[in-house]
């Protein structure tokens, strides 16, 4: 990946609105599922088709959504949904084989097989497809998975174009499939061919009112973020797989007042809220621990959160009713949580 050098940049919206109520699956645990099929989509990506064990329909989802996948080895990982959205259809995810895997992608590629049982956690969506007269999709590598779902959801007469970049065509899942389906709407750029995406030109040439949706590696998304303010005729919406660099943040001591359990928890400056809550015996589900997936969402009743996640952005960054306790802290010493 070699995105164009960042200049100055349209309003950027990373992620989306947080659900007003907890997802039922988060409360009641994972859905028992079985692996129905695995298919190699590129040299480095395998798609996995998932079906409920009891054969019942899986929860409905919208483009941009992801699930928690609970693997047989105990690991929980987040994967974007990219399959058909017809009622009763199985889920499909795409899994990149990462060189520095911590047990998720390596397990899927090496050990996961049809017939194995897995768990499907809550469906969450912080990367919703925004309505617009024209769409530009920019995908880097495995970032094509939520983008493909968005493209599939558009009407046949919708106006859109996909720019898809990767190291080589052999590593790019669904590239041939997308080009065959939409020959005039897909631009593929690969490092090994010497063809790179000119992000500044893509934004500059987009018609007024364009919604840009992008998912991929940090370099691609950072470049778009920097370019966007100079292009106010478009809005840029991104989803990240890695946390942004927050710089040197100063932590202080806090007191968590947990109203439902009538607990008061002192949190030293060097301890995350999530760790302090768990050490006090209060269960808060979590997964990524980096402020990316939204699993550890906690409702705030009083006080002002210091949002340090990569989920809320734009006006949503000013919300005071929720926080992600794996990374965020509080503006003041005391904060009241719905726990």
Image (cartoon, rainbow, N blue to C red):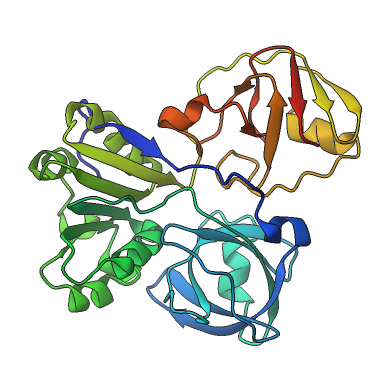
* Residue 171 in which image quadrant: bottom left
Q: Is residue 66 left or right of residue 165?
A: right
At a point 68% along the width and 82% down the height, the residue shown is: 116
Residue closest to the eye, 298 or 44? 298
Q: Is residue 68 left or right of residue 17?
A: right
Does residue 1 appear in this view?
Answer: no
Name the quadrant of the C terminus. top right
Q: Is residue 289 left or right of residue 339?
A: left
Residue 290 pos. (x, y %): 60, 39
Q: Residue at x 69, y 83 (%)?
A: 53
What residue sits 27% from the left and 66% below the top? Answer: 154
> Would you say residue 203 is visible in this rendering?
yes
Quarter-wise, where is residue 292 in the image? Answer: top right
The residue shown at (31%, 70%) is: 152
- Number of numbered markers: 0
On the image, the x and y values in percent for residue 183 come to: 13, 73
User: Where in the figure is residue 129, as x and y percent of width and height?
Assistant: 35, 54
User: Which quadrant holds residue 238?
Assistant: top left
Say left or right for 262 vs 217: right
Towards the viewer: 311 or 171? 311
Q: Is residue 236 above or below residue 95?
A: above
């Amino acid at each position: 990946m070699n995105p164009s050098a960042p200049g100055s940049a349209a309003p950027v919206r990373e992620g989306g609105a947080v659900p007003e109520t907890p997802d039922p699956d988060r409360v009641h645990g994972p859905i028992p599922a079985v692996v129905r099929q695995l298919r190699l989509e590129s040299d480095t990506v395998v798609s996995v088709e998932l079906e409920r064990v009891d054969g019942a329909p899986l929860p409905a989802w919208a483009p941009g959504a992801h699930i928690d996948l609970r693997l047989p080895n105990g690991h929980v990982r987040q994967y974007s949904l990219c399959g058909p959205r017809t009622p009763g259809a199985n889920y499909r995810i795409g899994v990149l084989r990462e060189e520095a895997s911590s047990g998720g992608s390596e397990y899927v590629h090496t050990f996961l097989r049809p017939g194995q049982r897995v768990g499907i956690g809550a469906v969450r969506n912080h990367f919703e497809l925004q309505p617009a007269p024209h769409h530009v999709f920019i995908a880097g590598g495995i970032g094509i998975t939520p983008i493909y779902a968005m493209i599939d959801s558009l009407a046949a007469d919708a106006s859109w174009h996909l720019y898809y970049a990767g190291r080589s065509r052999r590593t790019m899942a669904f590239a041939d499939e997308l080009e065959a389906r939409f020959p005039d709407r897909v631009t593929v750029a690969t490092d090994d061919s010497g063809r790179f995406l000119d992000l500044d030109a893509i934004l500059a040439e987009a018609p007024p009112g364009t919604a840009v949706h992008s998912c991929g590696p940090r370099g691609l998304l950072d470049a778009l973020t920097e370019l966007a303010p100079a292009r106010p005729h478009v809005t840029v919406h991104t989803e990240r797989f890695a946390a942004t660099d927050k710089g040197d943040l100063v932590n202080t001591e806090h007191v968590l007042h947990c109203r439902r359990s009538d607990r008061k928890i002192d949190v030293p400056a060097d301890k995350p809220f999530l760790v302090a809550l768990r050490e006090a015996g209060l269960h808060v589900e979590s997964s990524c621990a980096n402020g990316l997936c939204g699993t550890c969402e906690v409702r705030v009743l009083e006080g002002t959160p210091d949002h340090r996640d990569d989920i809320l952005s734009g006006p949503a960054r000013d919300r005071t009713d929720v926080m992600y306790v794996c990374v965020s802290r509080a503006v003041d010493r005391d904060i009241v949580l719905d726990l």
